[in-house]
Amino acid sequence: MGEMRERIIVALDVPTRAEAFHLVKQLAGWVGAYKVGMQLYNSEGPDIVRDIQLMGGRVFVDLKFHDIPNTVAQTSRVMARRLAFMYTVHAGGGSKMLRAAAQAAAEEADILKVEKPLAIGVTVLTSITQQEFEQEMGMKMPIVEHVVALAKLAQQAGLDGVVCSPQEIAPVRAACGHKLLIITPGVRPNWAATDDQARIMTPGEAIQAGASYLVIGRPIIKAPNPREAAQRIAEEMNKAATQLLTPPA
């Protein structure tokens, strides 16, 4: 059970420091990390990363950097200085940008003698449907093909992992092998609402498909008892992992 808890990243999609701290206190020891996205980061400022770390939590900084290579490289250095556990860049930024990010984060961590933050490439947002992908973004191919291509590009550029929907886990794993981390949002237990996510799976299904980490927000943070919700999800993940290790009769 402990290992599965470590693979849960709770999305702190709340507007205030007080709400974030309340959740971190409730979930301490029950999850592996906390995701700080644009809402909380922009509302409370960059020191929110340090403050959560001081409470004992690892922080996944999910700001999806997408700019010219030098800008993303310098921002990646900031992520190393802030001791981020993970941080995101847009995989669609191209190989030069991705390579600059990965190299800069590693160099800065080496200078500071700290653990290198994991550089993660965001592929296609989990809220986007195939129809939107084609009609609004002009991409005349299945989403899964584009996600796999971006994952391969990210891996070749030296990134540690990618973010993709649960439905793309297995194809990405098949294309990129087991060293590439796959971080998966769009995870919804059967007992939770789907909200605005379009390409989803249950926690157990995502683990069986090959996910490394699951990013889960509302099913935990909006639950009457967030700790109990996290425990239920970890139990489901553990059961799925056990089934993978159990040979068929």
Image: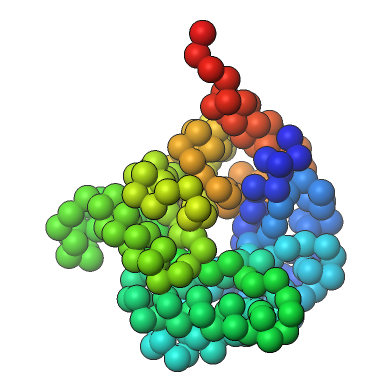
Q: Residue at x 22, y 50 (%)?
A: 142
- Identify which residue, 53 or 225, lies in the foreground: 53
Q: Residue at x 38, y 66 (%)?
A: 156
Nearer to me, 19 or 85: 85
Colour scheme of the picture: rainbow
Q: Quadrant of residue 136?
A: bottom left
Residue 165 place in picture, x, y as percent: 42, 50
Residue 172, compared with residue 102, is above or below; it is above
**Residue 70, x across and y down, in percent:** 45, 91
Give percent across and percent down for residue 232: 69, 33
Position of residue 248 in the picture relative to residue 67 (left or right): right
Label count reads 0
User: Would residue 86 be found to the left or right of residue 114 on screen?
Assistant: left
Residue 234 seen in this snapshot = yes
Residue 37 or residue 146, whichever sits in front: 146
Residue drawn at x 73%, y 35% as measured from the top left: 1
Seen from this angle, which residue lies furthest left? 140
- The relative height of residue 244 versus residue 16 in the rendered view (above or below) is above
In the displayed structure, does residue 165 sit left or right of residue 92? right
Left or right of residue 93, residue 111 in this image? right
Q: Position of residue 197 (x, y in %)?
A: 44, 49
| Residue 241 location, quadrant | top right
Work out whether residue 90 can be spotted. Answer: no
Q: Residue at x 72, y 84 (%)?
A: 112
